[in-house]
């Protein structure tokens, strides 16, 4: 009961225009005080935030954002987008398809979904609008394409899932690859048929294609380098983010596209973006702890577990619970509150851990593009000055695609487990 | 609802307090940026050192502490640039003066929250200092060090929030006078 | 009399034998003695605090009752470091040294109480194993290897034996071993199962207690504990003691089963014991570290030396 009141209070604060971290913190502090189990709620809040921010695994978050920002100031994202454009631009909705392809390639470099959406969005959005795509359609496409960042390896969401469930992070990464490519293909198909925009009008010669590819070669080598570093054992999944940053700086200096001013600008911007995300992660954890203390999440899961429902019903309920969670929690908090209690439930109905991981990551992706807190939508509205309300409508088809994928993974776990299985 | 940074109310202010606030916010975000560069270098160094057979035992731990610096020291600057996520869709539909009152109330609450958090962190530091708490690793780092970084970050943020509240009150007053 | 809830916080996998056996026995004992009036509410998987956070979370009362790795409290209580000293102790003699009057549970609890916590139970999950890509039997085999070491004491041990200690998070051990980022990993014996380490490293050795003891503890916030109704506290303390004994027995049984399982998975598992020729070499190679124990208090060293050298 208290949990529901606090949840309502939280929504009121959000609607009053309070920054989301403030609303999370205020709601959790009020909730903990009302719960009355703690004599030192302020100290507890401080401790929660200290614990959360001191977690080494989160180091990958600012590093991936940093790599993305550096690529952008060095113009590498432009080269990547151009590359996608000359190769797939001649199909119907070609620019849109090129955007999806650029997102997918960038996702193989970067483990963060916001960083993917913003980095590709900065070049793709103006190009799409200029090419006749409606701004909300373009924004929704990039926001959704950005979520590939956490499905296609490397992935911060998979790192966190791996830590929570003690699964091998490398195996989790591989598990996300095929579903990621499938989802990208779905998005590309949707764009081909529904963008109502013809192929990229500019004719492209083979000579041009080769020239653009040569230009983009440094970016194209990066995903290969990232995966090779992880699977050769050179670096762990977390450490590879730092190598990507160093690589981008080196390429920027080598190709003389990264000036000192660029570097300073990118560093400060990446810092601010990291601050913004970490504030949400830290205060989100505080809110998560409050809900945990009320026992509500456990209660819901117990009810589902004891209802003696079949596989289909439980999977459907899990999907619904995740959509609900995604309406008031940000990605990391969502994983922290749900995985410890949902993982045993998923196991009890016979879901493979790797399939469940992909299932959960897809749920997080949905949360990142559906209102009110779809973080990618905010990011895109910042990039393209698109109205969020209209973008929220354009994003619905992608939400449906991702939910469809969640069911597909539940019923055909092979989509997730096949590739890791071949690697043994 | 937009992340397009609308000019923060305090940007029009120009007096000693706000000049100091600007300087402190700048210093904070620069320190955070330096910590980000340091993390990049340390992690890279660790990978190379391990590759040539001389792994470090300090890199992981130190980068964990630096992460706190990255996460909080730029909080005030992020606020000044209105880059913290907020949903202003509903507030935007309100009339000017009503909207200003709602904003003022919301930011006062955030100020209270962060001020309370600063007290909480101070209590945490006092507790760690009393027991001489150190990390359990070889480095045995006194844990008040990262905790002080946390305190500094949120203290600067509290200051910036106070600035935001002052600016909003002034804005409210200016508009009230104009209406009269 | 009112209802009492014991909030119990753990981290890591909720299916760890130590958690499952302890929690099961604790709940059963409370049900029997208090008939459902006193219940346990479990917060698993680090929902309230991770292992490394417990030394702050318990004394400040954020966590009322939690599962801890005793060794991780070195930053707060120096003497716990003595438990990582290489000794010739067995799990049975270790349990004795823990429980006897003046044993290390008593000694440590006194120090926990000075810092706002109380150590209510101790269970040894057994000495950590060393999983490796190259066979390790004697201490000399560690020379020149890059070895993941999860704590200060174990890093000292790796250095003492001529290896290079590496700090790698638990969740990344699998990948690191698989790709040769490291040559070996000191890891809890159960961890070989939960991380499926047997898939990526061919060898494992549990070198007696020369990798120290795997002491896990069950600690409570002192203020919360003393604030309980004395009758209730007595019931809970009794239940905790039962759970401690039940868990110790379950762990020993579990370890035997695990060793068999790892062998079936194709792993070459060595359980070092005093009958083997290398035992003396391990003792000799690690004795300088044990000698360093002089820096710990006499109270904590007494039971360790008594149990460690006796058998
Ligand atoms: Na990715
Ligand atoms: Na969301």
Image (cartoon, rainbow, N blue to C red):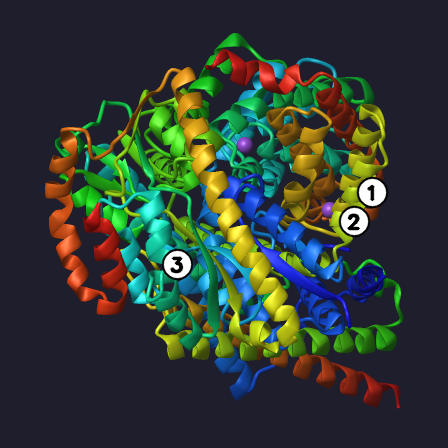
Residue A65, visible in the rendered structure: no
Q: Secondary structure at mark 3?
A: helix
Determine which of the numbered discs, if any, sits on residue A299 in the image: 2
Residue A185, visible in the rendered structure: yes
Name the residue beneath numbered marker 3: C99
Q: Position of residue A324 (x, y in %)?
A: 80, 45
- Give the side of residue A48 with respect to residue A142, left or right: left
Is A411 located above or below residue A299 in the figure?
A: above
Q: Is mark 2 within 8 Å of ligand 2?
A: no
**Callout 3 and callout 1 share a chain:** no
Viewer-nearest of discs 2 and 3: 3
Distance from the alpha carbon under mark 1 to that under mark 2: 6 Å
Name the quadrant where ligand 1 sits: top right
* Residue name at image x 51 percent, y 46 percent: C247
The residue nearer to you, when weighing A359 against A101, is A359
Is C290 located above or below residue A245 in the figure?
A: below
The N terminus of chain C - image quarter: bottom right
**Callout 1 and callout 2 share a chain:** yes
Question: Disc 3, disc 1: CB below 8 Å?
Answer: no
Viewer-nearest of discs 3 and 1: 3
- Give the side of residue A315 with respect to residue A214, left or right: right
């Amino acid at each position: 009961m208290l949990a529901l009141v606090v949840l309502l209070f939280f929504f009121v604060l959000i609607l009053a225009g309070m920054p989301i971290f403030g609303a999370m913190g205020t709601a959790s502090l009020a909730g903990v005080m009302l719960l009355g189990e703690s004599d030192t709620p302020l100290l507890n809040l401080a401790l929660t935030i200290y614990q959360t921010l001191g977690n080494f695994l989160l180091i990958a978050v600012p590093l991936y954002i940093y790599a993305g920002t550096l690529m952008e100031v060095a113009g590498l994202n432009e080269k990547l987008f151009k590359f996608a454009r000359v190769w797939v631009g001649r199909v119907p909705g070609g620019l849109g398809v090129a955007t999806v392809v650029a997102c997918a390639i960038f996702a193989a470099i970067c483990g963060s979904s916001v960083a993917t959406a913003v980095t590709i969005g900065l070049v793709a959005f103006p190009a799409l609008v200029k090419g006749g795509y409606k701004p909300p359609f373009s924004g929704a496409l990039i926001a959704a394409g950005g979520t590939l960042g956490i499905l296609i390896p490397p992935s911060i969401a998979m790192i966190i899932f791996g830590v929570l469930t003690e699964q091998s992070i490398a195996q989790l990464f591989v598990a996300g690859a095929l579903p990621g490519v499938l989802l990208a293909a779905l998005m590309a198909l949707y764009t081909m048929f529904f963008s109502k925009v013809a192929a990229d009008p500019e004719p492209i010669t083979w000579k041009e294609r080769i020239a653009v590819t040569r230009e983009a070669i440094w970016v194209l080598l990066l995903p290969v380098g990232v995966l090779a570093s992880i699977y050769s054992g050179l670096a762990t999944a977390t450490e590879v983010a730092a190598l990507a940053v160093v690589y981008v700086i080196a390429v920027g200096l080598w190709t003389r596209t990264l000036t000192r001013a660029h570097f300073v600008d990118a560093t400060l911007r990446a810092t601010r973006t990291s601050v913004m995300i970490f504030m949400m992660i830290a205060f989100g954890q505080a809110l998560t702890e409050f809900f945990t203390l009320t026992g509500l999440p456990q209660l819901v899961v117990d009810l589902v577990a004891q209802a003696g429902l079949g596989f289909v019903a439980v999977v459907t309920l899990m999907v619904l619970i995740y959509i609900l969670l995604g309406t008031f929690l940000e990605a990391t908090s969502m994983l922290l509150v749900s995985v410890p209690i949902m993982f045993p439930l998923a196991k009890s109905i016979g879901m493979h851990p790797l399939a469940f991981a992909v299932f959960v990551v897809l749920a997080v992706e949905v949360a990142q593009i559906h209102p009110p807190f779809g973080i990618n939508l905010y990011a895109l509205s910042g990039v393209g000055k698109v109205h969020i309300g209209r973008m929220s409508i354009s994003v619905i088809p992608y939400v449906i695609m991702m939910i469809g994928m969640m069911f597909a993974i539940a019923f055909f776990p092979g989509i997730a487990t096949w590739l890791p299985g071949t690697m043994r | 609802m937009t992340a397009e940074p609308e000019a923060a109310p305090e940007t029009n202010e120009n007096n000693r307090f706000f000049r100091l606030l600007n300087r402190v916010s700048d210093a904070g975000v620069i320190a955070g940026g330096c910590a980000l560069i340091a993390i990049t270098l340390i992690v890279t160094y660790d990978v190379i050192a391990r590759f040539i057979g001389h792994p470090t035992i300090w890199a992981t731990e130190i980068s964990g502490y630096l992460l706190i610096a990255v996460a909080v020291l730029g909080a005030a600057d992020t606020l000044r640039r209105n880059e913290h996520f907020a949903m202003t869709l509903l507030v935007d539909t309100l009339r000017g003066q009503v909207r200003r009152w709602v904003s003022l109330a919301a930011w006062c609450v955030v100020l209270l929250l962060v001020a309370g958090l600063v007290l909480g962190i101070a209590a945490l530091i006092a507790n760690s200092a009393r027991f001489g708490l150190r990390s359990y690793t070889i480095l045995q780092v006194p844990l008040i060090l990262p905790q002080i970084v946390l305190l500094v970050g949120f203290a600067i943020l509290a200051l910036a929030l106070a600035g935001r509240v002052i600016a909003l009150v002034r804005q409210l007053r200016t508009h009230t006078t104009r209406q009269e | 009399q009112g209802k009492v809830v014991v909030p119990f916080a753990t981290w890591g996998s909720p299916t760890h034998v130590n958690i499952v056996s302890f929690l099961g026995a604790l709940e059963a004992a409370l049900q029997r003695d208090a008939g459902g009036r006193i219940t346990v509410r479990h917060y698993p998987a680090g929902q309230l605090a991770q292992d490394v956070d417990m030394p702050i979370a318990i004394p400040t009362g954020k966590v009322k009752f939690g599962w801890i790795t005793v060794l991780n409290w070195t930053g707060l209580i120096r003497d716990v470091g003595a438990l990582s000293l290489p000794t010739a102790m067995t799990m049975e003699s270790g349990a004795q040294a823990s429980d006897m009057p003046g044993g290390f549970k008593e000694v440590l609890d006194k120090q926990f109480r000075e810092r706002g916590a109380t150590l209510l139970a101790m269970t040894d999950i057994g000495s950590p194993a060393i999983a490796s890509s190259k066979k390790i039997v004697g201490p000399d085999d560690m020379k020149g290897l890059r070895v993941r070491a999860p704590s200060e004491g174990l890093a000292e041990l790796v250095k003492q034996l001529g290896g290079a200690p590496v700090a790698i998070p638990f969740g990344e051990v699998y990948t690191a071993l698989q790709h040769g980022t490291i040559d070996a990993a000191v890891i809890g014996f159960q961890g070989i199962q939960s991380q499926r380490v047997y898939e990526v490293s061919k060898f494992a050795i549990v070198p007696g207690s020369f990798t120290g003891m795997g002491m896990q503890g069950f600690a409570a916030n002192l203020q919360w504990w003393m604030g309980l109704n004395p009758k209730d506290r007595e019931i809970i303390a009794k239940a905790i003691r039962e759970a401690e004994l039940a868990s110790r027995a379950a762990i020993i049984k579990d370890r035997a089963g695990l060793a068999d399982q790892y062998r079936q998975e194709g792993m070459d598992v060595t359980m070092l014991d005093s009958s083997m020729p290398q035992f003396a070499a391990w003792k000799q190679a690690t004795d300088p570290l044990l000698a360093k124990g002089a820096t710990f208090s006499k109270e904590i060293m007494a039971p360790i030396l008594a149990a460690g050298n006796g058998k």
